[in-house]
């Protein structure tokens, strides 16, 4: 896998190696952080950022912090914090004792704000949010100074205290940095530092009714933690001057640096917590962990392995320019990994009964099959064979089309790992639907070898009707049918795929499946990769299709002449 092979350094590694060589890293220890805002579950895009930050720390023997950037109490929940931590652990990363919250720094941020006011570098503004926007100017026109900009230090201190004491309604006052209303960078036009918000915070409760803004909190949190390389996505490039302003406030000892890389986008997938939350809230999916969701919780439940996702993001690389990665590359990585590790089972998704008339009625014998032919260390397991078996309905045709090599009357096929059988007749219901096939077997073809060495073209997978487990199988497809959801109409909901979930209630699985757990990766031979779902109960197992087998769709289409 590409993770282990030599690859050129990415631009952030180059910066780090230069910084280390030039002695610019305090104590020689690289410190990064992954800073999610706990306002939703992590998605596949976040995996990119998690791997980047944790792997840089690993590679350069530094450390990576987990920092929950909890500056917006209105949208944040403890459920999200727990899910974020669990997902990062699932990916195989650990922040050890370095778990921090922006809210841990509220007292320090407040002290810094007071200091800025005392030094005449911040002021309390009574412009309304709308007015503030108006005064801010545009990219081509400078902003206008607020009439409150030259309020006295004493008055600023008094008003800020009153804001903190809950004496003023939301939106009535804002604490702003006094930087430069004419700056070509809009983020330096006296950015807001504190706003009034009467919201209960998941961690600080009702202690505060003023909350620091992200652009003030984030750089100072980095500085407090001694972050050396603060890595974020490109949309923060314009905020870098504000970041540098905040980390150079007098009294802040450590100066971290911000570096931006391109956000990872994958075709067919939405990577916006806001849009994903909409799908959840409107019950368009079953929850954040719906196996169709591009969330870490969703792909876990669907049966992707952490290794395959790490391989995927490492193949994508670290870029400076935004692009869209093909969904098929992600599936390729998933299949590569599952092919190596998935335990093979026989499952019949759309069963049709075949009665082998010359096989003794009360007899049952066991065949041994390999758990995984791709893995030399994999074991073997037993599968029961009896007179009445189930095969896929599509593996029998009463009147075969040209080139059909599977079972039809008079034709002989191999039952995988068992015997050769020949169909002799079929039974139909009143609608003409085939309900049962009769066949004979060749007792000398045990294990798939015949005495005369004759070959057959078709092989079917099968299970014994009286030994198999009847299970529910959820066949998932992409949640959106367009590579760029919403491109055509402007509304991503228009591109929801109505066939993204098909439930099969009567699938049959070999009895070995009763031993399967949610830690197992499975292949249902010829049908795809599957994973046990958490909805399973004693006596009612549920399996999710992780993905189809390699090229199965292309092959199927070719067969159907499409
Ligand atoms: P969203 O737009 O989905 O809400 P976000 O950027 O607001 O995402 P955060 O919780 O703030 O989500 O993200 C935590 C970290 O993950 C940030 O450093 C952010 O830059 C990074 N990140 C988010 N999305 C991606 C992505 N698609 N690719 C790479 N990194 C990402
Ligand atoms: Mg964000």
Image: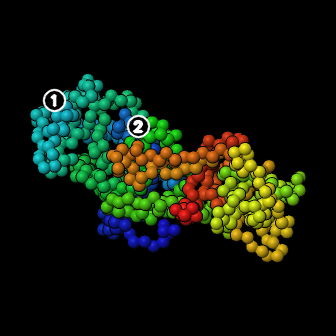
Asked if residue 169 can be seen in this view, the reply is: yes
Q: CA distance from mark 1 to mark 2?
A: 33 Å
- Structural crowding at the residue carrying mark 2, measured as other residues with C-alpha within 10 Å and reported as few (<14), some (14–19) or many (≥20): many
Q: Locate residue 20, reporting x and y percent.
A: 34, 66
| Residue 155 circle label | 1
The residue pinned by badge 2 equals 76
Q: Is 17 situated left or right of 300 in this image?
A: left
* Residue 45 as seen in the image, left or right of residue 165: right
Please identify the quarter of the rendering in which residue 373 is found: bottom right
Q: Say if 67 sits above or below 311 in the image.
A: above
The location of residue 500, given as percent across then percent down, is 51, 48
Residue 387 in which image quadrant: bottom right
Q: Residue at x 15, y 38 (%)?
A: 134
Work out whether residue 250 can be spotted: no
Counting from the top left corner in percent of width and height, residue 314 is at 45, 63
- Mark 1 or mark 2: which comes first in sequence? 2
Please tell me which residue is depicted at 63% across the width and 57% down the height of the picture. Answer: 527
Q: Which of 396/507 is in front? A: 396
């Amino acid at each position: 896998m590409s993770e282990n092979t030599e690859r050129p350094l990415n631009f952030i590694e180059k910066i780090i190696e230069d910084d280390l060589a030039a002695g610019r890293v305090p104590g020689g220890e690289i410190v990064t952080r992954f800073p999610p805002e706990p306002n939703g579950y992590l998605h596949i895009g976040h995996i990119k950022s998690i791997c980047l930050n944790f792997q840089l720390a690993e590679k350069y023997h530094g450390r990576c912090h987990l920092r929950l950037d909890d500056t917006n109490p209105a949208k944040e929940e403890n459920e999200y914090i727990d899910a974020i931590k669990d997902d990062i652990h699932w990916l195989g990363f650990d922040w050890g004792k370095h778990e921090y919250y922006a809210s841990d720094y509220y007292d320090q941020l407040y002290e810094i704000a007071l200091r800025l006011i005392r030094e005449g570098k911040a002021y309390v503004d009574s412009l309304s949010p709308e007015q503030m926007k108006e005064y801010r100017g545009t990219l081509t026109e400078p902003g206008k100074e607020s009439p409150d900009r030259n309020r006295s230090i004493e008055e600023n201190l008094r008003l800020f205290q009153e804001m903190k004491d809950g004496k003023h309604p939301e939106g009535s006052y804002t604490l702003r940095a006094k930087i430069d209303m004419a700056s070509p960078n809009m983020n330096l036009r006296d950015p807001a530092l504190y706003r009034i918000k009467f919201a209960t915070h998941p961690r600080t409760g009702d202690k505060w009714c003023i909350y620091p803004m992200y652009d003030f909190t984030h750089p100072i949190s980095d500085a407090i933690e001694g972050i050396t390389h603060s890595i974020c996505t490109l949309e923060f490039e314009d905020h870098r001057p504000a970041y540098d302003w905040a980390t150079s406030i007098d009294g802040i000892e450590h100066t971290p640096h911000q570096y931006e890389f391109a956000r990872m986008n994958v075709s067919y997938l939405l990577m916006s917590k806001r849009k994903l939350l909409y799908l959840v809230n409107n019950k368009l999916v079953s929850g954040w962990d719906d196996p169709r969701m591009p969330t870490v919780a969703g792909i876990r439940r669907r049966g992707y392995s952490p290794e395959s996702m790490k391989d995927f993001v490492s193949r994508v690389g670290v870029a400076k320019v935004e692009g869209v990665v093909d969904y098929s590359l992600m599936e390729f990585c998933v299949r590569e990994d599952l092919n190596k590790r998935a335990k093979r089972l026989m499952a019949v998704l759309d069963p049709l009964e075949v009665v082998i008339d010359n096989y003794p009625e009360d007899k049952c014998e066991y065949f041994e099959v390999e758990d995984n032919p791709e893995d030399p260390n994999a074991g073997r397991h037993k599968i029961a064979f009896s007179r009445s078996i189930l095969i896929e309905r599509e593996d029998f045709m009463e009147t075969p089309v040209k080139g059909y090599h599977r079972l039809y009357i008079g034709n002989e096929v191999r039952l995988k790992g068992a015997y050769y059988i020949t169909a002799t007749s079929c039974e139909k219901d009143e609608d003409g639907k085939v309900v049962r096939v009769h066949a004979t077997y060749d007792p000398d073809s045990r294990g798939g070898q015949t005495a005369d060495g004759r070959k057959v073209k078709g092989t079917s997978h099968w299970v014994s009707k009286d030994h198999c487990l009847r299970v529910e199988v959820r066949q998932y497809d992409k949640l959106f049918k367009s590579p760029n959801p919403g491109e055509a109409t402007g509304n991503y909901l228009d591109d929801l795929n109505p066939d993204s979930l098909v439930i099969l209630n009567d699938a049959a699985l070999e009895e070995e499946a009763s031993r399967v757990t949610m830690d197992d990766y499975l292949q249902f031979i010829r049908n795809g990769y599957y994973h046990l779902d958490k909805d399973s109960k004693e006596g009612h197992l549920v399996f999710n299709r992780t993905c189809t087998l390699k090229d199965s769709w292309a092959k199927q289409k070719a067969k159907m002449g499409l």
